[in-house]
Image: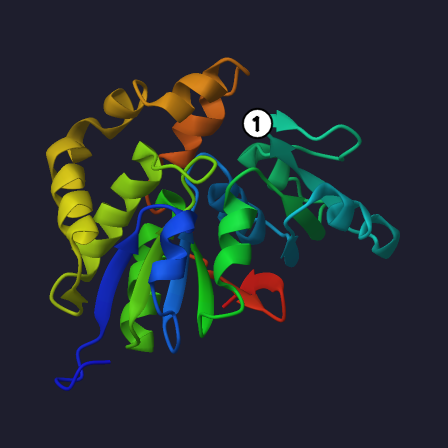
């Protein structure tokens, strides 16, 4: 934290760039709008008590004997043999209490930061205001980590990062051109966010799987008030 006691905020546009950032003492905010972090927020808001994010399929399957529901996708499709996929509607099923989850991008981003960041927070448009208030209360340096697509930049995560940075403006010092880019980008499209993102590569990719309803849901703002955080490798509500 800087000498004026105001914390800093920076944006990491892909997990591959995490290695260039010192996360010591900082909060890493993980963002995977389409759809992992949206699923995590929605599930934990609707009765799920534990979500274990893991990097690979075999690790996820090892939790089945402990009563966990297996959830996740690879390349946008449900993993063969898993109980559910990566739709927020599946994660909001009331009978599910414990979920183990692996995805192409979101859980990989968590894996990239969990051993170095002081705290890991899960964010989505669905809990934008709640995350904003939580981060203000923590008064610690923040790095927003966009999950992207297989190590590459994507539009929806970066636009969310811009939205969150704007919400935190005045309470944090902005750092880096990524923050400048993301905030200006979000400001320019915020009134037509859904229309713009329908031209994005990941929207088109997922549209081929017929999940437009998922993506529309993921762009709803402030639907939930919970803030998932990682405690001992398990996501729970703060």
Callout 1: few (<14), some (14-19), or many (20+) C-alpha neighbours within 10 Å? few
The image quarter in which residue 80 lies: top right
Q: Is residue 156 left or right of residue 41?
A: left
Quarter of the image where the N terminus is located: bottom left
Q: Residue furthest right?
A: 65
Q: Is residue 162 left or right of residue 58?
A: left
Residue 173 % position (x, y):
15, 68
Towards the viewer: 11 or 165? 11
Residue 180 % position (x, y):
13, 50
Look at 23% across and 64% down and name the residue there: 9
Q: Is residue 140 left or right of residue 91?
A: left
Look at 70% across and 34% down and name the residue there: 84
Which residue has dot 1 on it? 75
Residue 40 visible in the shown view: no
Relative vertical location of residue 143 with respect to residue 194 in this rendering, above or below: below
Q: Is residue 219 left or right of residue 177?
A: right
Q: Please count the marks in the image.
A: 1
Towards the viewer: 143 or 88? 143
Q: Disc 1 on helix, strand or loop? A: loop
The image quarter in which residue 126 lies: top left
Look at 22% across and 75% down and name the residue there: 7
Relative vertical location of residue 97 with respect to residue 83 in this rendering, above or below: below
Look at 48% across and 46% down and name the residue there: 37
Residue 224 % position (x, y):
42, 50
Residue 179 % position (x, y):
19, 52
């Amino acid at each position: 934290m800087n000498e004026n006691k105001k914390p800093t905020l920076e944006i990491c546009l892909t997990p591959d760039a995490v290695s260039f950032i010192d996360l010591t003492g900082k909060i890493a905010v993980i963002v995977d709008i389409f759809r992992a972090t949206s699923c995590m927020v929605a599930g934990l808001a609707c009765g799920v008590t534990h979500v274990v994010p893991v990097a690979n399929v075999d690790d996820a399957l090892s939790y089945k004997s402990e009563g966990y529901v297996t959830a996740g996708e690879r390349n946008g499709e449900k993993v063969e043999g898993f109980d559910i996929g990566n739709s927020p509607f599946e994660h909001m099923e009331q009978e599910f209490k414990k979920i183990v989850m692996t995805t192409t991008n979101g859980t990989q981003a968590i894996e990239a930061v969990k051993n170095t960041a002081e705290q890991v927070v899960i964010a989505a448009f669905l809990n934008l205001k709640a995350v904003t208030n939580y981060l203000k209360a923590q008064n610690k340096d923040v790095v927003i980590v966009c999950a992207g697509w297989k190590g590459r930049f994507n539009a929806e995560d970066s636009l969310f990062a811009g939205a969150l940075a704007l919400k935190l403006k005045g309470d944090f010092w902005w750092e880096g051109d990524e923050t400048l880019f993301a905030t200006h980008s979000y400001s320019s499209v915020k009134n037509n966010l859904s229309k713009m993102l329908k031209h994005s590569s990941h929207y088109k990719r997922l549209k081929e799987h017929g999940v437009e309803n998922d993506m529309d849901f993921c762009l709803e703002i402030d639907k939930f008030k919970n803030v998932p955080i990682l405690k001992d490798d398990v996501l729970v509500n703060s």
